[in-house]
Image: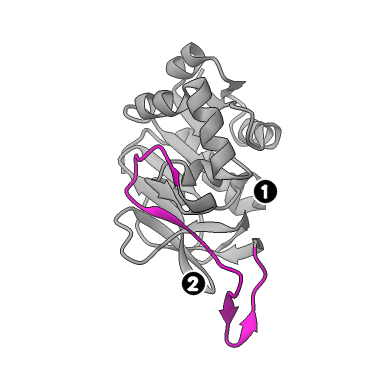
Amino acid sequence: MKTVAIIDYGMGNLHSARKAVEHVAPDTRVLVTGNAEQIREADRVILPGVGAIRDCMAEMRRLGVDTLVREVSRDRPFLGICVGMQALMSRSEENGGVDCINLLPSEVRFFGGTLTENGTRLKVPHMGWNQVYQAVEHPLWQGIPDGDRFYFVHSYYAEAKGNPDIAGRSHYGVDLAAAVARDNIFAVQFHPEKSAGPGLQLLKNFTDWNGTC
């Protein structure tokens, strides 16, 4: 039986993520755990995250999760979700600057208080359904139409322009990286566990993925 470990460091939609993975892969053992050995032994690992990146990174460093993520993301399928995606970047400009895990070179930007589109002011956070356009062919996009809609909740984003790891983009006043991918790492800004059919398909694809493209 395959095992998926969802890293529990006190910050994330752990229950909904676990239920979603169990739903799409009933033959998979899903663990919500902060136990380093259980995470090391898992076939696949998910890093969730909600809230402020400063608080998330503080907890990760206190618990040693940042080091563990660097280790386990080298050799098995690894999925980051929402702030779990942002944590993989080099730095976030939140709170004057927060250093992240630095597995991916991008920086995380604030949408700003005067975000507009065609003269209309947009609300921040970006909350709700938005289209995701696939930037690369990838096993995690299998069975998901290009331009399908996913559910977002965030005030900070990784830029799409010039991003060497871009796997999917969305637009909300600016072009943003909705998904990034490198080797056996795939990470999404949206919440697949809240994104109905497309999100569940992505999670199913993750449980079937062997970590190669």
Q: Secondary structure at mark 2?
A: strand
- Expressed as whole percent of the image width and height from the top left, the position of residue 145 reads 50, 61
- Quadrant in which the C terminus is drawn: top left
Q: Gap between marks 2 and 1, in whole Å?
A: 23 Å
Magenta highlight: main SS: loop
Closest to the observer, 27 or 170: 170
Closest to the observer, 106 or 17: 106
- Expressed as whole percent of the image width and height from the top left, the position of residue 175 reads 46, 69
Quick one: which residue is furthest to the front in this view? Answer: 96
Q: Residue at x 42, y 23 (%)?
A: 68
Q: Is residue 177 left or right of residue 130?
A: left
Quick check: 99 above or below 179?
A: above
Q: Which residues are magenta?
A: 98-124
Q: Is residue 118 left or right of residue 16?
A: left
What amino acid does circle 2 point to?
Answer: Val
Quick check: 186 above or below 61?
A: below
Q: Is residue 124 left or right of residue 188?
A: right
Queried whether the magenta region covers residue 72, the answer comes back as no
Residue 174 is tagged as 2
Q: Residue at x 52, y 46 (%)?
A: 202
Q: Residues within 10 Å of mark 1 (few under 14, many from 20)?
A: some
The residue mark sitting in front, 2 or 1, is 2
Residue 88 is tagged as none
* Residue corresponding to mark 1: 194
What amino acid does circle 1 point to?
Answer: Lys
